[in-house]
Amino acid sequence: PFTIRISCGSFDDVHTAPTNTLWYRDFGYTGGRFANATRPSFIVPPLKTLRYFPLSDGPENCYYINNVPNGHYQVRLFFALVADPNLDSEPIFDVSVEGTLFSSLLSGWSSDDEKTFAEALVFVQHSSLSICFHSTGHGDPSILSIEVLQIDDNAYKFGSLWGKGTVLRTTKRLTCGSGKPAFDEDLNGIHWGGDRFWLGLKTLSSSSDDQPISTENVIAETLLAPNFYPQSMYQSAIVGTDRQPTLSFEMDVTPNKNYSVWLHFAEIDNGITAEEQRVFDVLINGDTAFKDIDIIRMTGERFTALVLNKTVAVSGTTLKITLQPVEGTHAIVSAIEVFDIIPAEMKTLTQEGWCLTLSKLSSLYFKQ
Ligand SMILES: *[C@@H]1O[C@H](CO)[C@@H](O)[C@H](O)[C@H]1NC(C)=O
Ligand SMILES: *[C@@H]1O[C@H](CO)[C@@H](O)[C@H](O)[C@H]1NC(C)=O
Ligand SMILES: *[C@@H]1O[C@H](CO)[C@@H](O)[C@H](O)[C@H]1NC(C)=O
C-alpha cells in the first residue's frame, strides 16, 4: 500500500523505534511555524517537533499532499503541545480532510490517549489530499504528525451510504480482555489494515462484573480482506459472569448522526464447545441489531473470527451496546469499533480557502 508519514516541523527525515518507522521531513504545509513538541501521551509517536498555526499569521493552515494515488486511505493526525512553558498549553481546534470537517478537539484532549489523535477514512480522487486546521479562538492549532495510509478499496464497507460520498471518522476502537493499548503493528497486523490503534480494555465498564479471558490458540479467518484484522485481537475477550451475564458498553456520541458499529467475536472459552451453548442478542440503544448470535454455529468452529457490522442512527448523546444472553449463560465480545458516518462536502479548494478565511475571521472576532 501507498504510505506517507510526515513528522511536522522537522527539517530531517526521522526513524522511530521500535519498528524503525520512516517519517518524512515536514512538507506540504501552507503556513505555520515549527516548534519543539511535548507529547501528551505515550501512544503518540516519539517525534520531537510539531507545526503550529498562530492566528496572527493568517488564515492558511492546511497541508496539501500531492501525488497520492487515487484510492482509499486512513488519514491519521496526532496532536501535541508546543514545548514552551509560557504558552497557554492546550489548543482547541477543528480538523477537516478534503473539505469535510470531521473532528473537533475538546478541552482535556491532551490528557486522554484516545483523543490525542484524529482519524478519518477517505477516498482520494484527484491525486491530492487536503488537511486543514480551523482555529476556534482557543490557542493555535498544533500538529505533530500526519499519516496517509492506503487501505483496501472496500475497507469498512458498511452498506449503501458507504463510498466517496461519506467520510468515516474513527470514534472508538477497543480490543477487549487484553488491557493493553496496541497498534496493528504490535498485533502482527499487515499494512493493508492501516495500522489501527486499539484501546485495550479489561472490563467494559468500571462498575461491571464482566471478566477478561484469553487464549494462545490460533484463530482462523483473520487477516482477511477487506479489513485485515489481526489474529491477536481475537485471542482475548470479555465475557459475562454469573453475577452479570449481560455485557454492556456505553459511550458518549454527538447526537443526530449515523454510526457504523463493528463487532468482533471468536469462541475462545474452553467451557463452550458446541452450538447452542452460547447464544445472545445484540442491542444498540435498545433496538435489536443482531438476534441469536451463536458464534460456533455462524463460524462453524471454535477459535474462528466473526465480524458483524450495523449502521445505526443515534438521536441522543449515548450509544449503548448490550449483549444479552438467550441460551446458555454469558455473552462474549472480542473487539468493538464505532465510526461516525459524515457526509462528504463536495467543496472545491477555493471554497475551502474561503471557509477557512471565514472561520479565521470569526474566531478573531470572537477573541476581541
Ligand atoms: C528545540 O530544542 C532544541 C534542544 O533540544 C533547541 O536547540 C532548539 O532551539 C529548540 N527549537 C525551538 C524552535 O525551540
Ligand atoms: C456489513 O454489513 C452489511 C449489511 O449487513 C453487509 O452487507 C456487509 O457485507 C458487511 N460488511 C462487511 C465488510 O462485513
Ligand atoms: C442517516 O442515514 C439515512 C439513510 O439511512 C439518511 O437519510 C440520513 O440523512 C443520515 N443522517 C445523517 C445525519 O447523516
Image (cartoon, helix red, strand yellow):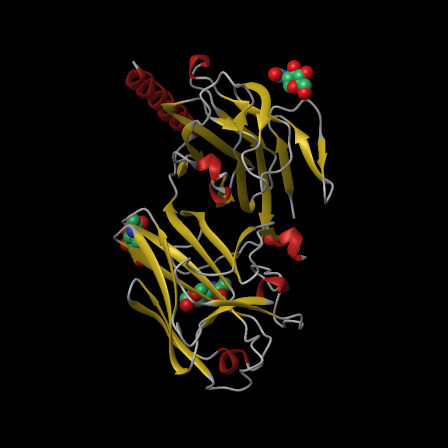
Do we see residue 97 in this rendering? no
Q: Quarter of the image holding residue 109?
A: top left
In the depicted structure, whether residue 267 falls above or below residue 22: below
Q: Nearer the viewer, residue 234 or 220?
A: 234
Residue drawn at the location 34% of the way across and 24% of the way down? 359
User: Would you say 130 lies left or right of 361 here?
Assistant: right
Percent of width and height locating residue 197:
56, 49
Do we see residue 300 in this rendering? yes
Percent of width and height locating residue 264:
50, 66
User: Would you say 328 lies left or right of 296 here?
Assistant: left
Q: Nearer the viewer, residue 185 or 271?
A: 271
In the depicted structure, whether residue 22 falls above or below residue 52: below
In the depicted structure, whether residue 126 falls above or below residue 139: below
Q: Quarter of the image holding residue 206?
A: bottom left
Q: Nearer the viewer, residue 11 or 154?
A: 11
Percent of width and height locating residue 253:
34, 49
In the depicted structure, whether residue 222 falls above or below residue 184: below
Percent of width and height locating residue 188:
68, 57
Q: If the image is split into quadrants, where does the C terminus sit? A: top left
* Image mark count: 0
Residue drawn at the location 65% of the way across and 48% of the way down? 1
User: Would you say 351 lies left or right of 308 here?
Assistant: left
